[in-house]
């Protein structure tokens, strides 16, 4: 019998939508938490595409694996009472409504705390739970701009550019997941529950990292550098005879290794590039010289030559090439799951590796159907069959 996963003793009520919230919950579900996804019942007068058809997309399956689904109409008094009864038995609640919605529904932290003082209540919003923008709707695209990220992304002079992934959504989700784990540890030490919250904006201001610190410490405003590193040189994208390659040779040791591998002693001895600071100050000139060397070789030749010399270097892959690369295959980044309609397919596993939990095999569950486990969950939580029948008649589930 396989050993229980680290979070298997925790029950999580999942109210999340879109991407940021589900990303936080996925951290918990992948490591064994009992996730109960709470969704509104299907309105027969409305289009079913958002609640049923869209559940079969790769995105939905990847976000909502390892969960069960229950339907609850939170806008009714009966549905609210049902939620509170479930909340009284839960360890964690996660939501990413606009900040005022949970209060309007009467399922905010203080309301839940009144029935379960030890609850860990996790929230993600666009701009924070308070402040002048707290009521604004927030999505990844908008926050990439508001956080300053787009101003440092892209080629100089070509205007702001969006990062190619939903980075503020996924970052906020990962930060909230970490915060929930911290709160669970705190509860084990003190018995206290608490409200854990972050926002897309806070997460991105944190993710900007050293460009942010350059401003907070020195007032320096970073700008676009395209494919070049903002403070190191040479580090960036360079041409080869059959494409392009990423390489990093900014430290004195790596720059020496690069010059030796490329049989370029004159470059290493050039006074214009004799120190880290000089290489960065003269980075455009240096990059041009490096490019004249790399373009003489194929991508594969440069990668082999520089990595052998201890100089970091790698290819520019498509998504297909990235997943088919031998290293990705060795890492077993894909795990399979079986779905009664979609059949068997692969999803991207958690990147966390725990030595006590090797070879986890496939995912336990695919993304659930709407309300697929409503009866099962209610029976588990102590509801009688007559109560469940009454909830159905009242359109609470």
Image (spheres, rainbow, N blue to C red):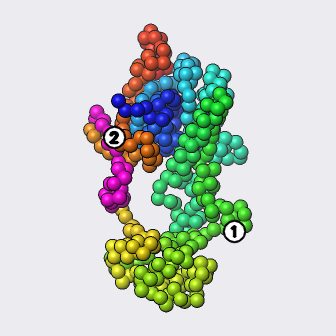
Judge depth for marks 1 and 2 and give the one in front: 2
Name the residue tied to disc 1.
220
At 44% from the left and 9% from the top, the residue drawn is 386
Return the x and y of residue 287 as percentages of the image width and height: 50, 81
Name which quarter of the figure residue 308 lies in. bottom left
Name the residue tied to disc 2.
361
- Is residue 352 part of the magenta span, yes or no? no
Residue 21 visible somewhere in the drawing: yes
Name which quarter of the figure residue 346 lies in. top left
Classify 319 as above or below 271: above
Return the x and y of residue 335 as percentages of the image width and height: 34, 44
| Mark-to-mark CA distance, 1 and 2 | 48 Å
Return the x and y of residue 126 as percentages of the image width and height: 60, 46
Name which quarter of the figure residue 276 lies in. bottom right
Return the x and y of residue 175 as percentages of the image width and height: 57, 46
At 42% from the left and 81% from the top, the residue drawn is 261
At 28% from the left and 33% from the top, the residue drawn is 340
For label 2, the crowd category at 10 Å Cα-Cα, with few meaning under 14, some 14 to 19 and many 20 or more, is few
> Which corner quadrant holds the N terminus?
top left
Going by the image, does 112 lie left or right of 325?
Answer: right
Q: Which residues are magenta?
A: 319-341
Q: Residue 282 got which mark?
A: none
At 35% from the left and 50% from the top, the residue drawn is 332
For label 1, the crowd category at 10 Å Cα-Cα, with few meaning under 14, some 14 to 19 and many 20 or more, is few
Choose between 271 and 51: the one closer to the eye.
271
Whether pointer 1 and pointer 2 mark residues with C-beta atoms closer than 8 Å, the reply is no
- Is residue 326 part of the magenta span, yes or no? yes
Going by the image, does 371 lie left or right of 125?
Answer: left
Classify 67 as above or below 262: above
Residue 29 visible somewhere in the drawing: no
């Amino acid at each position: 019998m396989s050993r229980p996963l680290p979070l298997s003793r925790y029950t999580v009520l999942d109210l999340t939508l879109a991407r940021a919230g589900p990303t936080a919950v996925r951290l918990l579900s992948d490591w064994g938490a009992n996730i109960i996804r709470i969704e509104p019942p299907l309105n027969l007068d409305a289009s079913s595409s958002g609640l049923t058809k869209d559940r079969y997309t790769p995105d939905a399956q990847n976000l909502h694996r390892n969960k069960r689904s229950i339907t609850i109409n939170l806008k009714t008094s009966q549905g609210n009472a049902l939620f509170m009864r479930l909340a009284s038995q839960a360890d964690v609640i996660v939501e990413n409504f606009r900040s005022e919605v949970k209060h309007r529904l009467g399922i905010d932290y203080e309301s839940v705390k009144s029935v379960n003082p030890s609850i860990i209540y996790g929230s993600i919003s666009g701009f924070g739970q308070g402040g002048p923008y707290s009521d604004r709707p927030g999505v990844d695209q908008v926050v990439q701009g508001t956080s300053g990220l787009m101003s440092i992304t892209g080629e100089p002079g070509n205007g702001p550019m969006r990062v190619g992934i939903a980075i503020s959504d996924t970052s906020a989700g990962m930060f909230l997941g970490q915060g929930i784990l911290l709160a669970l540890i705190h509860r084990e030490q003190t018995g206290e529950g608490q409200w854990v919250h972050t926002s897309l904006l806070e997460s991105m201001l944190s993710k900007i990292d050293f460009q942010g610190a350059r401003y907070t410490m020195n007032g320096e405003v970073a700008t676009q550098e395209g494919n070049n590193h903002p403070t190191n040189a040479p580090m960036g994208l360079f041409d080869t005879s059959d494409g392009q390659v990423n390489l990093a040779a900014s430290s004195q040791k790596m720059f020496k290794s690069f010059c030796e591998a490329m049989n370029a002693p004159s470059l290493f001895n050039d006074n214009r590039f004799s120190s880290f600071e000089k290489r960065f100050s003269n980075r455009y000139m240096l990059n041009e010289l490096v490019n004249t060397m790399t373009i003489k070789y194929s991508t594969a030749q440069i990668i082999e030559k520089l990595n052998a010399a201890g100089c970091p270097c790698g290819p520019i892959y498509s998504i297909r090439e990235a997943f088919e690369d031998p290293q990705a295959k060795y890492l077993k980044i894909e795990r399979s799951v079986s779905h009664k309609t979609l059949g068997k397919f692969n999803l991207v596993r958690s990147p966390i590796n725990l030595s006590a939990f090797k070879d986890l095999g496939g995912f336990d569950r695919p993304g659930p159907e709407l309300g697929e486990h409503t009866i099962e969950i209610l029976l588990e939580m102590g509801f009688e069959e007559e109560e469940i029948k009454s909830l159905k008649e009242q359109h609470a589930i």
